[in-house]
Amino acid sequence: MSEVKIIEILEDVNAENNRTADAVREMMKRNGTFFVNFMSSPGSGKTTLLTRLINMLKDEYKIGEMDVDIKSSVDAKRVADETGIRSMQIHNGGLCHIDADMTSRAIMEYGAEDLDILILENIGNLVCPAEFDTGAHLNICLLSIPEGDDKPLKYPLMFTVSDVVLLTKIDTLPAFDFDLVKAKRNILNLNPNAIIIPVSAKNGTGMAEVVSLIKKEVEKIKNESAGTLC
Amino acid sequence: MSEVKIIEILEDVNAENNRTADAVREMMKRNGTFFVNFMSSPGSGKTTLLTRLINMLKDEYKIGEMDVDIKSSVDAKRVADETGIRSMQIHNGGLCHIDADMTSRAIMEYGAEDLDILILENIGNLVCPAEFDTGAHLNICLLSIPEGDDKPLKYPLMFTVSDVVLLTKIDTLPAFDFDLVKAKRNILNLNPNAIIIPVSAKNGTGMAEVVSLIKKEVEKIKNESAGTLC
């Protein structure tokens, strides 16, 4: 019964992981650094969206980025090349997710004290990353139009733990049978508070709305951070 | 060090799993049933491709299909509705993969003795399913054009364990920056024997080639099965 074994271990790991995640979240708040976790399938456009987003925010905020991959460093290199910010590649040794233990060690090595925003580009996977709290203040999930409007039904946990869902590659809508109303209903049935924003990193649709959302979250953390110093 | 714990468990599970997978493969060969495992990201077009493929093969062969999902039954229902064959939904309890223990139990419950072909539609995930041998005779992986040509670099194990890579949604090539030459090179660097076929389940491109490949594999199993009876 190999799958039962794994579930038991995951439960143990999850309890420990949640404590570490809370500690990471608290530490980042004290620093005044907004920590945001981007999750999605492979190929949903995380790296392209993030380079555009960082370029729209970097004049106003000091931003760092951590990129998780099994082996390659293509994403971290692309983000660094296309934005000029400092980017860190985390190789997670073939695992399907990143947990709070790994983010906490990566943050210590990376040094986030001077950052306003720390972005985590999680590994491309709709299943496992949803199971592990990374310690981020906000979870953003991308669902790209080519993937189909039924994905929330098939990967419910991802859409339940995400505060924000970005419907990416919205410019390709005419090429695919993607029902926007159905997709939104599928997401809101799981997570009535989810903020859903259709975006295109290619033509810019929705990007201003994402920037405005991130700015609000940064200010919230800054205010809470000031509060902890009183 | 939660991730080390998981790795150790996975190694134990893998050794046990490989033995079960070999037993499943041998049993299916004795039955004369070709067992094929389809893997990919979420939204790469597995279900659409499979319904078309099954409709092209079902007059000549008796086909069964098993569909793995965390919770929903949308895929198995779609396959059954659109092809008329018997389809089984396996709910894997939130796990990110299916292993040989699970396929073997599912096959026993489903009853595959009378089938020429048993198709497994694995869970949408480029990481974990690659780690678990399901006992299939052939692994087919789908990489859709919207996902990008760099995915083999980022999910190397999937492209190493797959005998065949189908480049799906090839009809959408004009809408995306997907370099076919680069994608093929990235796959063949990992797996020099990989058979790569560009396909579109929408307009039919490449589907005859996939049908011909499946037919050859079915005949191979039938011949080997006849050999085991001598």
Image (cartoon, coloured by chain):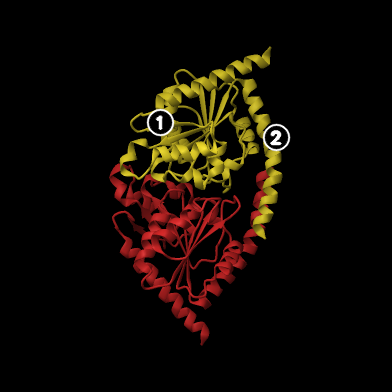
Chain colours: A yellow, B red
Residue A225, position as x, y percentages in the image: 63, 18
How many neighbours does mark 1 have within 10 angstroms: few (below 14), some (14-19), or many (20 or more)?
A: some
Check the image and report above or below for B162 versus A230: below
Q: Amino acid at mark 2?
A: Arg
Give the residue pinned by disc 1.
Answer: A82
Which kind of residue does numbered mark 1 sit on? Glu
Q: Residues within 10 Å of mark 2 (few under 14, many from 20)?
A: some
Q: Please provide percent x and percent y for residue A114.
A: 57, 21
Give yes or no for contact between labels 1 and 2 (Cβ–Cβ under 8 Å): no
Can residue B113 be seen in this snapshot? Answer: yes
In the rendered view, does B84 fall on the left or right side of A24?
left
Residue highlighted by disc 2:
A19
Q: Is residue B66 left or right of residue B214?
A: right
Count how many numbered circles sit on residues in the image: 2
Mark 1 chain? A
Q: Quadrant of residue A175?
A: top left
* Chain-order first, disc 1 or disc 2: 2
Please report the residue visible at 56 percent of the width from the left and 38 percent of the height from the top.
Answer: A160
The residue sitting at the bottom extreme is B230
